[in-house]
Image (tube, helix red, strand yellow):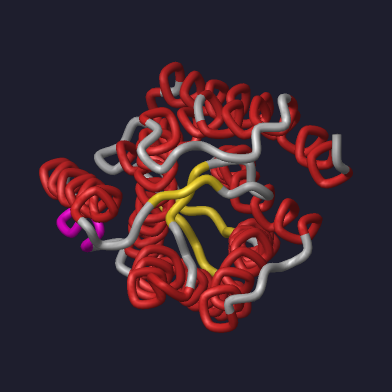
Amino acid sequence: MQIHAVLYVILMIPTSIGSILANILLLLVFAYNLKLQTETSALTLNFCICDLLLGLTVIPFGVHNSLFGITNYTKDSFVCQSTAFFYMLLQLASVHSLTWSTIDKFTEICFPLHSAQLFTKKRTWAILCLLWIYCLINASFPFLGFGSYKYGERKFICTPNLQQSSKGYGVVLIAIGVIIPILIMCSLYIYIVKIARNQALRGTFACNDQHCYYVPANNYFRRTIVLISTAMCLLVCWMPYITISFYEMFTGNNIAPLIEVIATWLVLFTSALNPWVTIMSQK
């Protein structure tokens, strides 16, 4: 068993277990806490379910391939093609659901008087329907002749073929499917942190039906730490994979196996990380 395969198994088994347990925990938290069941909580539950399915299907598939030393699947292999389809579908749905959840947080903080009108229950479900249609279309493109799915010998899973022969497909896929959503999230987080900082410097009073009370500055700063951590986690987990994909597409060269294993693990690790970030951001 090669070194990179051993490392893959060591990294992926805890990731799969962590993804399953963390996302089940998050589902239970939302199920038993009525205060969290808002008009837009479906956005959070959507990426939670996507991450849970990644931990149950794609990651164990990669662990199986690395343990048994599988080096290839036939081009028309149903197992490989279906696994790649679900990998693509679930990753896109997770990233875009997280993006819309961030937009929802942004409107709650920056437009508190209008957020209830902007994100209604009907609009939330309309967003989810359009999101899944978009993800299904993108995941189906390789079956329609735009790009292809193949088994990555050093990733141990079947993924979109991001090589020089399908450069245009790969660039569009990564740019629209991953880079733009992550940039939107990071930009909104930065703006929210800026607003929280200004609000903390001014100080504020929060009122209910009975009385008003002063909100100390450290309440705002604690919340911004979570937002900054979220943005940093997204960048750390996705940037190596994006960089390697562009490098291989434009040069035709392959990265060292250990680096590719770590980059693949970081992307899949988000399925275990996202629920903890969401839990931390709740009161």
Q: Quadrant of the C terminus?
A: top right
Residue drawn at point x = 30 percent, y = 49 percent = 139
Q: Where is residue 151 in the image (x, y as percent from the top left)?
A: 52, 45
Q: Is residue 214 visible?
A: yes
Q: Quadrant of the N terminus?
A: top right
Q: Quadrant of residue 41?
A: top left
> Which is nearer the eye, 146 or 200?
146
Residue drawn at point x = 65 percent, y = 30 percent = 65
Q: In this view, does 241 lie to the left or right of 209?
A: right
Up/down of 115 relative to 155, above or below: below
Q: Where is residue 190 in the image (x, y as percent from the top left)?
A: 54, 76
Q: Where is residue 198 in the image (x, y as percent from the top left)?
A: 56, 80
> Which is nearer the eye, 152 or 127?
152
Q: Is residue 169 magenta?
A: no
Q: Where is residue 75 in the image (x, y as percent from the top left)?
A: 41, 43
Residue drawn at point x = 38 percent, y = 24 percent = 34
Span highlighted in magenta in the image: 114-118
Q: Is residue 65 left or right of residue 249?
A: right
